[in-house]
Image: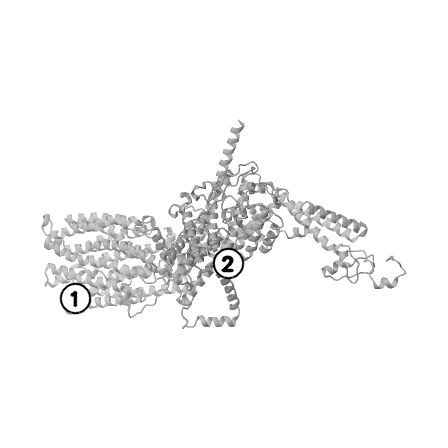
């Protein structure tokens, strides 16, 4: 019946008009079935089916607004592409015209939609739309308008080129699968823009925050509004079609996901990559694909257009292969690419590929899982598979021919054409073999045959790993000593991966389960040594690689995993076998992981801070903390595949728990409870500077103030590492004896001039009156002239090694000449030269001690150094007595002349030894008796102690000195102290004035002062290790104040007189505490402290030259009332100044001035490193451009020759 029949009003009111479709189908332009109560399409989609009995009035139709939006988006995208293609022709006027035309076209479209007379018929519209869609589907149209709106944009060419440069400099070395020159040429041609779009977006995601310039990196990051959306677009786009470029984009995405610590997102992509590589037939060589078969697979790729493109496809596959292996040995899952799928040649050397020089490489053999099961021998499984005969050429190039025969030895394979990437693939496969064919094999431990086969497999794999390293060509073997400036990334990763394979292979033998009854018969100790040696080698290689200035980019994710395994096995060794202390390499590896995490975030830290390396570091620190806190905690050797993921979940749950205040408060109560064993305060936090563990920086154990005398003999505290103890012993056996010997000779000479005056020189040379005082005056003048210049020279690392030996040699020569003294003026000249060349032996020695020993170590050594002067003065008395008795008149010379000859004989060999033994400062060129590791450790120790690097000497340094209180307190304290020391050496004058003793006794009795000085000089400074420095300092000052007050009274018993003079020897402990204290409070400025200590000696001895003449004239001796009175006041003065300096120093520490100074210097160093890296990048770019120019010129010359 006709639906339009007007005789059926009831049906029209009850049922929909048969001529009208439902609203949903009309909106979607579908053929409606017109069924009631719901049509077929609405029933499938679950939408409401509504029929209208009347046609809608003219106006906007359903879906019209959506169509307008789609057309508008398409127009905008088209204009954007036109703008990018012709940026040089764009102008503000043209943009205004484009906007006007866009609005005009939009208005016309709206008018057409609103006017039904101007609109085409629905049937024609539907037919044209269907026709267009069929055509687009037929030609493989890549995207529709709805996807074009969501497509992320790219920055302009200038920024994009910088991002691409950063990619090829920082990311490409780890996944070398894109030929740089070919890629850049394709971009210039604009013929493959759509094919390269996923790759470019992937590069933007992975390399944008590695651009050297911070402003460009920030702009590139800002252009990626939603990184997750861009990533999803790349994944969606790349999985829609099978192309090599899509595989490259997905590989970059996987590399980024794993490095960002979101490896779970990458596993499914890696599985897809392995299948896509198989579908594209990248798992086999092209000659293998051309072999006849009864079932020809579908071909998705065209044949390569040359050897370079074929090598690029080969490298794409091997990058997929590495990702598949990484997924397997980090998760414990099976591999996706097996021997049934893979038959590929190894990639060639990178230089040959860049130069596009066709070379032949061997096939790489993948083991058959069935053939490599436990019980089947693997000794004859080839490392490189058999030759596959070539049938056709690859696009005109010669197929590879260098292959190995089955069962051939590795040495018979021609590996001369492969590079570091190929060896990295071999090492990665070795690690995968250990996992798949040893660790994942199911073995019945109770079955003798299974156990025997498992142990046999262990031996076979061990032999293969050893042979791989032994048979490496010389140029591919790692040699850190010869690779100080260049280490190939993939070669470094190959060696690190090889050592990780050794660790995983030997770990079950080194740490067997406790339920194994035969565990005592396993070679566990050998495996322990192997694991430890491999972990230490990983730490050494990694630490050296990270310190090379050229390598400033991120590291491969596999590298982080290997470092994690190495640190973990060292922790296992310490935990399971209760070794003496945790190996210092563990903390080096922890620091290396921290550096890797920082480098992954980019030079400007714009990338993710929480990444794979930081996760590994957090897991290791957490394991170490639990080992310290929980005595029953055990580390499962085989849990390396799960504990990282579980720890990450636990940390997240802990952070969520801490968000709840009531739980957080309970946790704080538990953590602060005093009776909880192993609280966080008890866990030592090792300090690592420049990759070196400074164990002395950790908190030492508490010391008893009542047993302080026991620590006098503890020169090497127990919390020091064995490396640090070894370094201190070297320093104590070399530096300390050398500078003590030099200082001993100086005071021996000083004592001898006094003894000679009282042993015949006065009478022989007819010396009178004040001439005796002028001996020391001229000596001090020479000392003052050279003091500050010499200290500034010693602060320069370049000259520090040679200043002291040269001055010591010249001093020895002058000493010999002193035996020919004939008059007072000649003595004055000799004493002036002696003071001139003696300068480095005093303040220079203290500067060197403070540069090699930490602040809590230097006081003890300074005490030993200073008492050598007392030993010299005491020995001088005995030597003068022996010379007067045995050498007087020998050779026609008096006994006092022979004393100077003996001085020269002793000092000259010491001066010559200084040229070979004296090390200067830690930053000086390395001396022969220190290894490179020793010098690095010494520098790290002092850096941790607050010692800063040397700076320029100039006006800024003088401003820093004179604007701070340190200079005035230090100089004032030392001047006051120095003026009080002269009287301690004048006991011989008082003994002679009594007239009760012989010449021998006159020279011997005053040595009691030096004997006491030796004892207190060693013991009192050592108490600084236990007590605050002001306690022993004030104790010694109080004793000296008592002595000066007693001598001021003078009329006292003879015994008290001797006691007062003897106790003046307490002054020997003041200098070993005062000078190191000055170095301590000024340790953040090397130049300022060298200038200040030089000024202390200069000003102190400047006052000393006239003070003894005025206060202690020899004509008024030995009862110097005026001098003793002045000494009492001066002693009170320097005690007051010292306590004021101590108060100001503590105030500055609390105010954080030192910490801010260190942070400022570290920021300045980081900025300098940034500038240095930028200059290195510029230099590398210039070299690259120059090399490209030379290559282009050579190619042009060759073409001219061919034409001729």
Q: In the displayed structure, does residue 348 sit left or right of residue 961? A: right
Q: CA–CA distance between discs 1 and 2?
A: 72 Å
Q: Earlier in the sequence, mark 1 or mark 2?
A: 2
Q: Secondary structure at mark 1?
A: helix
Relative to 966, residue 889 above or below: above
Residue 1111 to residue 189: above or below: below
What residue is disc 2 on?
A: 610
Task: Indicate the colouring scheme.
Answer: one colour
Q: Position of residue 777 (x, y in %)?
A: 22, 54
In the rendered image, is residue 1107 in sight? yes
Closest to the observer: 174 or 695?
A: 174
Residue 513 at x, y percent in the picture: 42, 62
**Given this view, does label 1 or label 2 mark the residue nearer the observer?**
2
Number of callouts: 2
Which of the two residues, 118 or 444, is positioned nearer the viewer here?
A: 444
Residue 539 is left or right of residue 1041, and the answer is right
Secondary structure type for disc 2: loop
Quarter of the image with the N terminus is: bottom right
List x then y, in percent, for residue 985: 19, 60
Quarter occupied by residue 1117:
bottom left
**Residue 937 at x, y percent in the picture:** 36, 55
Q: Residue furthest right?
A: 7
Q: Does residue 210 appear anywhere in the picture?
A: no
Q: Which residue is pictured at 38% across the width and 58% down the height?
A: 524
Check contact, mark 1 vs mark 2: CB within 8 A. Answer: no
Which circle marks residue 1058 in the picture?
Answer: 1
Q: How busy is the neighbourhood of tag 2: few (under 14 within 10 Å), some, or many (20 plus)?
A: some
Determine whether, in the image, residue 446 is placed left or right of residue 869: right
Q: Residues within 10 Å of mark 1 (few under 14, many from 20)?
A: some
Q: Is residue 668 left or right of residue 927?
A: right
Nearer to me, 806 or 80:
80
């Amino acid at each position: 019946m006709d639906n339009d029949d007007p005789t059926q009003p009831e049906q029209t009111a009850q049922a929909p008009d048969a001529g009208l479709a439902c609203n949903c189908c009309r909106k979607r332009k579908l053929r409606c079935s017109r069924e009631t109560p719901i049509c077929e399409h609405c029933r499938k989609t679950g939408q409401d089916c509504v029929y209208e009995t009347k046609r809608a009035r003219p106006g906007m139709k359903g879906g019209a607004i959506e169509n307008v939006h789609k057309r508008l988006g398409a127009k905008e995208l088209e204009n954007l592409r036109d703008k990018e293609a012709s940026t040089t022709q764009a102008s503000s006027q043209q943009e205004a015209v484009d906007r006007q035309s866009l609005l005009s076209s939009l208005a016309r479209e709206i008018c057409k939609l609103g006017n039904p007379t101007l609109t085409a018929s629905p049937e024609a519209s539907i037919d044209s739309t269907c026709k267009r869609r069929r055509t687009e589907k037929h030609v493989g149209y890549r995207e529709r308008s709805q996807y074009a709106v969501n497509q992320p944009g790219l920055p302009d060419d200038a920024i994009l080129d910088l991002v691409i440069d950063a990619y090829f400099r920082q990311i490409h070395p780890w996944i070398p699968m894109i030929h740089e020159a070919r890629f850049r040429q394709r971009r210039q041609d604009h013929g493959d823009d759509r094919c390269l779009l996923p790759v470019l977006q992937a590069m933007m995601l992975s390399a944008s925050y590695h651009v050297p310039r911070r402003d460009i990196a920030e702009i590139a990051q800002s252009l990626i509004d939603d990184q997750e959306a861009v990533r999803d677009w790349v994944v969606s786009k790349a999985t829609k079609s099978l192309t090599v470029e899509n595989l490259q984009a997905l590989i970059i995405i996987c590399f980024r996901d794993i490095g960002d610590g979101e490896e779970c997102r990458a596993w499914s992509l890696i599985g897809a990559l392995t299948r896509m590589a198989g579908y594209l037939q990248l798992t086999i060589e092209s000659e293998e694909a051309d072999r006849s078969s009864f079932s020809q697979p579908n071909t998705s790729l065209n044949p390569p257009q040359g050897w370079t493109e074929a090598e690029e496809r080969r490298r794409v596959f091997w990058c997929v292969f590495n990702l598949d292996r990484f997924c397997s040995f980090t998760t414990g899952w099976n591999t996706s690419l097996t021997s049934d799928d893979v038959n590929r040649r190894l990639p060639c050397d990178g230089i040959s590929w860049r130069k596009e020089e066709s070379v032949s490489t061997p096939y790489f053999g993948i083991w058959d899982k069935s053939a490599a099961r436990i019980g089947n021998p693997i000794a004859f499984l080839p490392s490189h598979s058999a030759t596959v005969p070539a049938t056709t050429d690859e696009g005109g190039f010669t197929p590879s021919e260098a292959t190995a025969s089955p069962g051939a030895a590795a040495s018979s394979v021609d590996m001369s054409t492969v590079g570091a990437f190929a060896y990295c693939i071999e090492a990665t496969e070795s690690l995968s073999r250990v996992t798949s064919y040893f660790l994942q094999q199911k073995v019945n431990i109770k079955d003798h045959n299974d156990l025997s086969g498992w142990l046999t497999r262990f031996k076979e794999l061990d032999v293969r790993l050893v042979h791989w390293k032994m048979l490496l060509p010389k140029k591919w073997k790692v040699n850190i000593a010869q690779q100080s400036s260049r280490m190939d990334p993939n070669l470094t990763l190959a060696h690190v991966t090889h050592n990780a394979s050794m660790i995983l292979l030997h770990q079950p033998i080194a740490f067997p389960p406790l339920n194994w009854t035969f565990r005592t018969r396993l070679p566990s100790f050998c495996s322990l040594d192997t694991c430890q040696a491999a972990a230490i080698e990983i730490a050494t290689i990694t630490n050296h690689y990270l310190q090379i200035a050229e390598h400033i980019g991120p590291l491969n994710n596999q590298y982080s995993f290997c470092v994690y395994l190495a640190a973990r096995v060292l922790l296992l060794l310490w935990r399971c076998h209760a070794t003496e202390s945790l190996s210092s390499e563990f903390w080096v590896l922890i620091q290396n992981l921290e550096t890797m995490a920082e480098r992954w975030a980019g030079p400007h830290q714009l990338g993710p801070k929480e990444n794979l390396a930081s996760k590994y570091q957090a897991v290791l620190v957490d394991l170490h903390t639990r080992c310290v806190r929980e005595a029953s905690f055990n580390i499962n050797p085989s849990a390396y595949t799960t504990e990282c993921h579980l720890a990450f979940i636990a940390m997240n749950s802990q952070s969520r728990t801490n968000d709840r205040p009531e739980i957080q408060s309970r946790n704080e109560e538990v953590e602060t409870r005093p009776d909880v064993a192993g609280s966080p305060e008890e866990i030592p936090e090792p300090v690592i500077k420049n990759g070196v563990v400074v164990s002395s920086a950790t908190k030492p154990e508490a010391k008893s103030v009542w047993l302080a005398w026991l620590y006098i003999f503890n020169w090497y505290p127990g919390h020091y590492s064995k490396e640090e103890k070894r370094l201190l012993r070297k320093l104590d056996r070399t530096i300390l004896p050398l500078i003590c010997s030099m200082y001993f000779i100086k005071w021996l000479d000083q004592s001898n001039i006094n003894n000679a005056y009282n042993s015949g020189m006065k009478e022989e040379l007819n010396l009178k009156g004040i001439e005796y005082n002028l001996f020391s005056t001229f000596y001090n003048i020479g000392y003052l002239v050279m003091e500050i210049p010499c200290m500034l020279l010693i602060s320069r690392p370049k000259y520090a090694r040679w200043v002291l030996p040269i001055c010591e040699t010249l001093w020895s020569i002058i000493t010999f000449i002193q035996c020919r003294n004939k008059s007072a003026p000649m003595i004055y000249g000799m004493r002036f030269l002696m003071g001139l060349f003696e300068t480095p032996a005093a303040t220079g020695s203290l500067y060197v001690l403070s540069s090699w020993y930490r602040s809590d170590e230097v006081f003890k050594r300074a005490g030993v150094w200073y008492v050598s002067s007392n030993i010299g003065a005491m020995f001088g008395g005995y030597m003068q007595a022996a010379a007067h008795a045995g050498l007087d008149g020998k050779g026609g010379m008096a006994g006092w002349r022979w004393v100077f000859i003996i001085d020269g004989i002793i000092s000259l060999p010491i001066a010559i030894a200084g040229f070979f033994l004296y090390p200067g400062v830690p930053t000086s060129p390395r001396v022969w008796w220190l290894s490179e590791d020793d010098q690095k450790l010494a520098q790290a120790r002092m850096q941790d102690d607050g010692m800063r690097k040397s700076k320029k000497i100039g006006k800024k340094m003088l401003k820093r000195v004179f604007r701070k209180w340190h200079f005035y307190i230090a100089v004032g304290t030392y001047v006051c102290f120095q003026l009080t020391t002269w009287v301690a050496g004048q006991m011989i004058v008082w003994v002679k004035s009594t007239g009760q003793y012989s010449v021998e006794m006159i020279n011997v009795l005053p040595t009691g002062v030096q004997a006491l000085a030796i004892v207190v000089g060693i013991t009192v400074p050592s108490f600084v290790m236990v007590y605050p420095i002001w306690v022993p300092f004030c104790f010694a000052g109080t004793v000296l104040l008592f002595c000066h007050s007693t001598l001021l009274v003078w009329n006292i018993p003879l015994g008290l007189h001797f006691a007062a003079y003897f106790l003046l020897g307490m002054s020997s402990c003041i200098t070993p505490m005062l000078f190191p204290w000055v170095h301590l409070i000024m340790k953040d400025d090397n130049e300022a402290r060298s200038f200040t200590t030089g000024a202390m000696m200069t000003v102190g001895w400047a006052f000393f030259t006239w003070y003894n003449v005025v206060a202690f004239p020899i004509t008024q001796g030995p009862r110097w009332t005026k001098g003793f009175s002045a000494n009492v006041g001066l002693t009170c003065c320097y005690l007051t100044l010292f306590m004021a300096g101590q108060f100001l120093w503590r105030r500055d520490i609390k105010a954080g001035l030192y910490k801010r100074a260190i942070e400022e210097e570290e920021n300045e160093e980081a900025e300098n490193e940034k500038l240095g890296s930028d200059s290195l990048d510029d230099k590398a770019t210039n070299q690259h451009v120059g090399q490209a120019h030379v290559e282009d010129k050579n190619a042009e010359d060759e073409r001219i020759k061919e034409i001729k």
